[in-house]
Amino acid sequence: MERKLIKQGKGGFTIYLPKKWVDSKNLKEGEAVDVAEFENGLFVSSESKKHKSCALTLDEEGRNDVKNILTHVYRRGFDKISISGLDNKSFSIIEATIKEQLPGLEVTEHRDDTCVLESLSDPTDQKYEALVRFLFFIIKETQQIIIKDFETNRLSRFKEIEERTRKHDRLVYLCRRILSKELYSHNAVLEWELLTFLMHIQHGHYYLYQYASEEGVKREAEVIVLLKELASYFDLFYNAYYKREISSVHKINSSKFKFQLGECIDLLEKTKNPVVVSYIRELFRTIQIGSSPILAGLFDEKITSQA
């Protein structure tokens, strides 16, 4: 939206803040807001972050789906969550979910069929970029484990892959919580979309390894070559995001004809492990379509710099 500058005093300027935004933050005349400078713009936020709380009452279906409900509420940024309608099983699921996936959240009260969860340590905007970089690192680590184990024909580290995937999920939820609490000043919609694709990419590797280890898939040279090309393909994804290389996005998109519509199809027709190749092909596809929010962010930066 466009706002005109209003001259104030000796060289200062003011603008009107949108009424809808002011009302949504419950701001009143005389209250302070925080103004932070970043890149080519200013980020205005309410100075005192509002303490968000919610109350949930579970029925039988809700108790069966309590894990998904809790992770959704967590990533929405609520600081205090009161839950009623629990049984022993659903409370045990809550405890396990907090431990495995929701950092900073703790049970502060539990009696009968109710409990209260509170955030005892919340993230800051400074942590977001480090967390996202770690998400990329976990995927890269997972890829190297898979390549090595396929090369040595020893698929014995599923528990390790599983733990990395749990950690990855936990950090994605934490990043989404930061975005929901408006602690990060970049485009939250694009970042949320990127986090979703990063989660899908890690999960794709997890399911690939799970299948291969359970089925006792044997070493196949062409599959190993494809796995190494997949790792290089993800390097382009990383460079596009962190080095802000739009050329890497173009390479990702143009290479789909080589990989997911070329080499993967060719190998599917002759491999002894078609399910494994199908997983790899889907990972190429996920990385390719996952570059979309990165490309959108790079175009936004370019438009802003030319304005």
Image (spheres, rainbow, N blue to C red):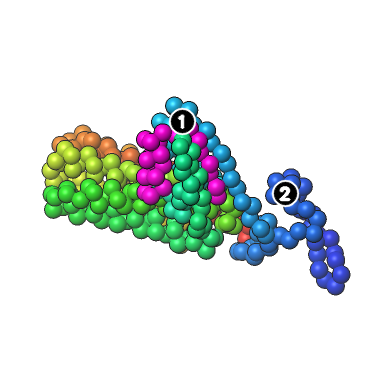
* Magenta residues, start to end: 79-100
Q: Earlier in the sequence, mark 1 or mark 2?
A: 2
Q: Residue furthest front?
A: 112
Label disc, if present, on residue 62 of the rendered structure: 1
Mark 2 sits on what residue? 26
Residue 95 belongs to magenta span? yes
Question: What residue appears at the point 41 percent right and 47 percent down from the top-left corner?
Answer: 98
- Residue 221 visible in the shown view: no
Asked if the residue at tag 2 contacts the one at tag 1, i.e. Cβ–Cβ closer than 8 Å, the answer is no
Q: CA distance from mark 1 to mark 2?
A: 32 Å
Residue type beneath disc 1: Gly
- Residue 203 visible in the shown view: yes
Residue 288, percent across and down? 40, 45
> Which image quarter holds the C terminus?
bottom right
Residue type beneath disc 2: Asn
Label disc, if present, on residue 251 of the rendered structure: none
Question: What residue appears at the point 68 percent right and 56 percent down from the top-left corner?
Answer: 46
Label 1 environment density (alpha carbons within 10 Å; few <14, some 14–19, many ≥20):
some
Residue 197, percent across and down? 42, 45
